[in-house]
Amino acid sequence: MDHPLRYVFHSHAAAFGGRIVRPKDIILEAGGASALVVTGGRCVSELKRTQFDEFFEVEAARTLAEGTFEDTAAFVEVTHKRAQEHSLAALSRARAEVDGLAIGRKPRLKIARIRAELTNRSAGYSGQPSIRIGKDTVIDGISIEGFKLVVELNTKPFLQYDTHAKLLAAVDDPKFVSKSGETLFMSKRFGGDTKRPAFRTLIQTGGTIYSTIVKSIRWDGKPFPKSEIHDNMVVLPEFGRVFFGELLISEQSRRLTMVRMALGSDAGGSASAGDIETNGVWSP
């Protein structure tokens, strides 16, 4: 039996999720999320105001996962068996939007707007897909008990180096490290440990690189008492640790999480919001 190459689509987008285990055990169940079947198409969801006890709420959220072939006419030729599917270019997209997120009791963290998007173009001869971050990716309106936090993003390095191979080649260039090394935790920057070397190797496990789209984090006015800023993480006393703009990069996929919280004071547990991933492979 003939098993020609076909494209296996994959994209997912989740508005939020996690689990709070104290003072109550609450699983953060998102009623809407989007994920593609292997043949692509479009999957969308929309959530209205959602609340879990007094600890977690969002005003609204939307997610989208989409996968299509770039050239419709060429796809028609494939359906007539006048061309092979592997001659096509596949496009996929994952997007998550969250409005009015609030978590914690006192102190309570609020985020007015989260937008995240990844777009993927199927691999060519290199075997690695081109995956880019959407231009309107943003996180703003962040505050905790009235103290305002500003998170500035830098997505340019991940637009220019849109494959795993390109990024690996770039990190051997001192000019790249000098200009964009902080996105890969390779150079010293704001709020860092003064004892930390000015240059470090990549943080990676199993070929997956840990990086961040965060350029800077600062308080707009007075800082939250006894808070600390380290790279893309903010330590908030009586709340826990908050990580912004985490990007996991492998040969075949990229996964972006806009905010991840390790709760460890008033409430205990973990939660995240604006989580998306896209990839896609040719397979029998």
Image (tube, grey):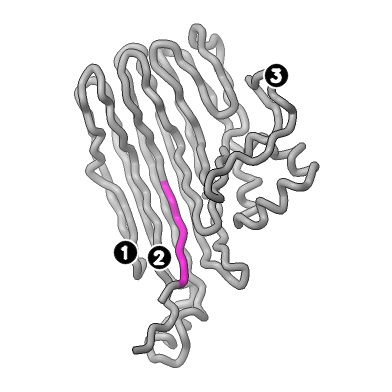
Q: Earlier in the sequence, mark 3 or mark 1?
A: 1
Name the quadrant containing residue 15: top left
Determine the secondary structure under disc 2: strand
In the image, which disc is placed on residue 9?
2
Residue 242 horizontal/vertical position (percent): 45, 25
Name the residue type under label 2: Phe
Q: Is residue 127 left or right of residue 272?
A: right
Name the residue type under label 1: Val
Q: Return the residue at label 1.
A: 37
**Circle 2 crowding by C-alpha within 10 Å: few under 14, some 14–19, many from 20:** many
**Circle 3 crowding by C-alpha within 10 Å: few under 14, some 14–19, many from 20:** few
Q: Nearer the viewer, mark 3 or mark 1?
A: 3
254 vs 282: above or below: above
Residue 201 horizontal/vertical position (percent): 68, 39
Outermost residue toward the front in this view:
206
Q: Earlier in the sequence, mark 3 or mark 2?
A: 2
Q: Are marks 1 and 2 in contact (CB under 8 Å)?
A: yes
Q: Nearer the viewer, residue 152 or 190?
A: 190
